Amino acid sequence: MRLLLDTHTLIWFLNGDSKLSQNARTAIEHPNNLKIVSIASIWEIAIKLSLNKFKFDKGFKSFLELVENNGFVVLPITFEHALTVSNLEFFHRDPFDRLLISQCVTDNLVIVSKDENIAKYDIETLW
C-alpha cells in the first residue's frame, strides 16, 4: 500500500503519541507499505514551528532527520497536483489538506488521517 501521511499523523507517529490509532500505526510500521510525506506537510510544520504553534525541542533539522531515518519518502508538489487542487470541491478549506487530497487523487495514494473532512473526498482513507 502507498500511504500518504497527513501532517498530524506524521507528528503523532514520530512522537509516539497515543492519539494515533493502532490501525494507522500498524499500517505505517508494515514493511511492505510505502510511507510518503508530502513536502506540503514539511512546509506546514515549518510554518507552525515559526509561529510557535508546534514545538520540537531538538529543532526542525532534527525533525527532518527523523523523517528520513524512518524511511519516509518525501513527495514533491507537481503541476499535476496543482491542477487537481484547482478542480477539488470545497469540502475542506485548509490549503495544506487540499494539496494532500490532490496528491492522493493524482498519485492514487491512501491517506492516513483522522480528519473527517478529508473522508468526504473520493479517496481512500485509513485510520
Image (cartoon, helix red, strand yellow):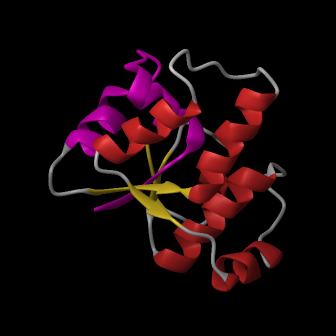
Please name the residue shown 79% across and 78% down the image. 87
Left or right for 31, reference 100? left
From the top left corner, tell me how far across and down residue 73 is, in percent. 38, 59
Tell me: 106 left or right of 102. left
Is residue 45 depicted above or below 49 in this figure? below
Residue in the picture at 51% in, 30% down = 11
**Which residue lies at the image location 66% right of the left edge and 55% below the top edge?**
120
Image: 117 above or below 124: above
Q: Residue 72, percent across and down?
A: 35, 51
Residue 117 seen anywhere in this rendered image of the structure:
no
Horizontal relation, residue 78 to residue 12: left or right: right
Confirm whether residue 55 shows in the render.
Answer: yes
- Looking at the rendering, the stretch of residues picked out in magenta corresponds to 1-29
Residue 41: x %, y % from top left: 61, 48
Instruction: Locate the N terminus and report the quarter of the image it occupies.
Output: bottom left
Quarter where residue 2 is shown: bottom left
**Nearer the observer, 42 or 8:** 42
Of 76 and 116, the residue lying toward us:
76
